Amino acid sequence: MIKMKFIKFLFLFLCIVGLTPQLRAQQEAMYTQYMFNGLALNPAYAGSHESLSATLLFRDQWTGLPGAPSTQTFSIHSPIRNAKIALGLQVIHDKIAIFNQYGVNGSYAYRIFTDKGTISLGMQLGFTSYNADLSALGPQDPTDPVFQGDVNKVMPNFGAGIYYYTDKFYLGLSAPQLVTNSLTEDVIEIDTDARQERHYFLTAGYMFELSHNVKLKPNILIKAVEGAPIQMDLNANFLFSEVLWLGVSWRSLSDFNGLVEIQLTDQLLLGYSYDFATTTDLSRINSGSHELMLNYRFRYAKNKVITPRYF
């Protein structure tokens, strides 16, 4: 009985705390098309499209694996009248096995315009509703107190970031989750305190003009989580005739990714990515990850021209 209880607790502890690098990294949702969805990583990204910009994103990770991560986000951001200030809002739902998270974050960015580019200082404030349905684990002993108390918490969130960008280059550093809220302090039978970990993101990219109709944009994303290995995303996207993006990415410790983005109109961008698992054990039990993104930039005046944004 004691041994079985220990095994159950160990499994639960691994799921909540995330002792493996992959699980620990998953406290924050993962995105393959981060280079087109910057507000998800950095509040200072708000207003960078110089128009009201709304993005929907749907991600199914490790398709075919029971309990695999699933993420849906909606974000919207825009500069306001004096242009130096920008506001944004992000709503996110992230589900992994028995764990459900709903988050709402409001972003504020103050922008400093220079001759060469724009420096944006951002912060975000919001909350996360966290639920862990422990009873769904199906314990052999339904009276086991470890599995009697589901976790239901509403937790505050604060984040910050800095973002520098020009027409051809961007560089950002952010920490969207700075508050290390406890996830298990209300569960009496669990002695170990599982907490939200701080995540740090460094992003950069540059647009090279190879010819009149072909451009190349390499991107890099470095993710650091306290207590886990640093993860790196390397990406290269080709843009053809300002309409079609084709790209490939490599994510360390994880997978390769293929991306395609289509500029359907001056205002509407449709994107899709597919992740190929590179770790043998993981590739045997899932059929890859799918991510669909839709971005729309609003134009209020009929004669207003939407300036192309590559980031």
Image (cartoon, rainbow, N blue to C red):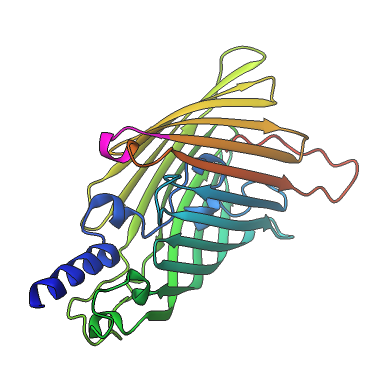
Quarter residue 262 falls in: top right
Residue at (19% x, 72% y) in the render: 9
Where is residue 153 shown, x and y percent of the image? 41, 80
Residue extending furthest toward the right: 302
Whether residue 105 appears in magenta in the rendering, the answer is no
Residue at (22% x, 76% y) in the render: 193
Residue at (81% x, 47% y) in the render: 299
Residue at (21% x, 80% y) in the render: 190
Residue extending furthest toward the top: 211
The answer to whether 19 appears left or right of 248 in the picture is left
Where is residue 49 shown, x and y percent of the image? 66, 46
Quarter residue 308 falls in: top right
Where is residue 47 shown, x and y percent of the image? 63, 52
User: Can you see residue 84?
Assistant: no
The quarter in which the N terminus is drawn is bottom left
Residue extending furthest toward the left: 3
Q: What span is in magenta?
A: 276-282
Q: Nearer the viewer, residue 229 or 147?
A: 147
The answer to whether 14 appears left or right of 245 in the picture is left
User: Can you see residue 50?
Assistant: yes
Position of residue 283 relative to residue 105, above or below, is above
The answer to whether 101 appears left or right of 250 in the picture is right
